[in-house]
């Protein structure tokens, strides 16, 4: 399983917001993109997904930008990845998006399902606050 660049960058953008705007300050997207070495255009597409998920609040005009909608400890890394990528499943048959016609007879499905559970449980246990502690 490879987490997409959009997913990785979404976690980094959220961490930057938590670090720089933790007290409700709005941070310009241009500044976030520069600090995280992400193009502004790509950052805009990531913020659109995070905004749609209700993870960030936007303000326009002077002093505008983005801030977190909640405290960093209230965001699970898994939820950020899902907002950006829609799935964090290691294989398509465990994502639920496409039903597998062989699931009941597949000898490997239990392994993939267990791996899926392990990945999701691990990412569910990590919060944005844990990420920010690494800055």
Image: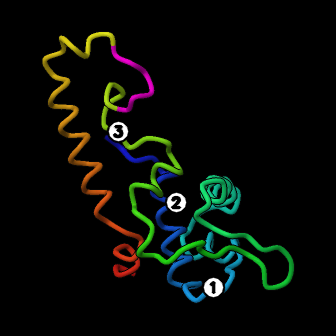
Mark 3 → mark 1, Cα distance in angstroms: 33 Å
Identify the image quadrant of the C terminus: bottom left
The residue at the far bottom in this view is 23
> Helix, strand, or loop for circle 3?
loop
What residue would you read off at disc 1?
A: 24
Earlier in the chain: of badge 3 and badge 1, it is 1
| Colour mode of the rendering | rainbow
Q: Residue 51 carries which label?
A: none
Residue 126: give x, y in percent of width and height.
Answer: 31, 66
Q: What stretch is highlighted in magenta?
A: 95-100
Judging depth in this view, the residue of 62 and 117 nearest the camera is 117
> Helix, strand, or loop for circle 1?
loop
Q: Residues within 10 Å of mark 2 (few under 14, many from 20)?
A: many
Q: Determine whether 97 is above or below 18 in the image.
A: above
Marks 1 and 2: in contact by CB < 8 Å?
no
What residue would you read off at disc 3?
A: 89
Main SS class of the magenta portion in the image: loop
* Residue in the picture at 59% in, 84% down: 21
> Helix, strand, or loop for circle 2?
helix
Residue 110: give x, y in percent of width and height.
Answer: 16, 28
Mark 2 → mark 1, Cα distance in angstroms: 19 Å
* Residue in the picture at 45% in, 67% down: 75
Q: Is residue 6 magenta?
A: no
Q: In which quarter of the image is residue 68?
A: bottom right
* Residue in the picture at 56% in, 68% down: 37
What residue would you read off at disc 2?
A: 10
* Residue in the picture at 31% in, 57% down: 123
Mark 3 → mark 2, Cα distance in angstroms: 17 Å
Q: Determine whether 128 is above or below 117 in the image.
A: below
């Amino acid at each position: 399983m490879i987490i997409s660049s959009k997913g990785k960058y979404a976690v980094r953008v959220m961490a930057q917001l938590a670090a720089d705007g933790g007290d409700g300050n709005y941070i310009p997207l241009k500044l976030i993109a520069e600090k995280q070495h992400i193009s502004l255009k790509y950052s805009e597409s990531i913020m659109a997904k995070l905004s749609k998920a209700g993870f960030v609040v936007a303000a326009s005009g002077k002093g505008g930008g983005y801030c977190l909608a909640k405290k960093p400890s209230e965001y699970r890394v898994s939820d950020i990845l899902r907002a950006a990528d829609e799935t964090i499943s290691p294989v398509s048959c465990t994502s639920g998006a496409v039903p597998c016609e062989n699931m009941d007879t597949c000898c490997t499905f239990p392994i993939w399902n267990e791996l899926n559970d392990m990945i999701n449980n691990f990412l569910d246990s990590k919060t944005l606050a844990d990420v920010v502690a690494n800055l």
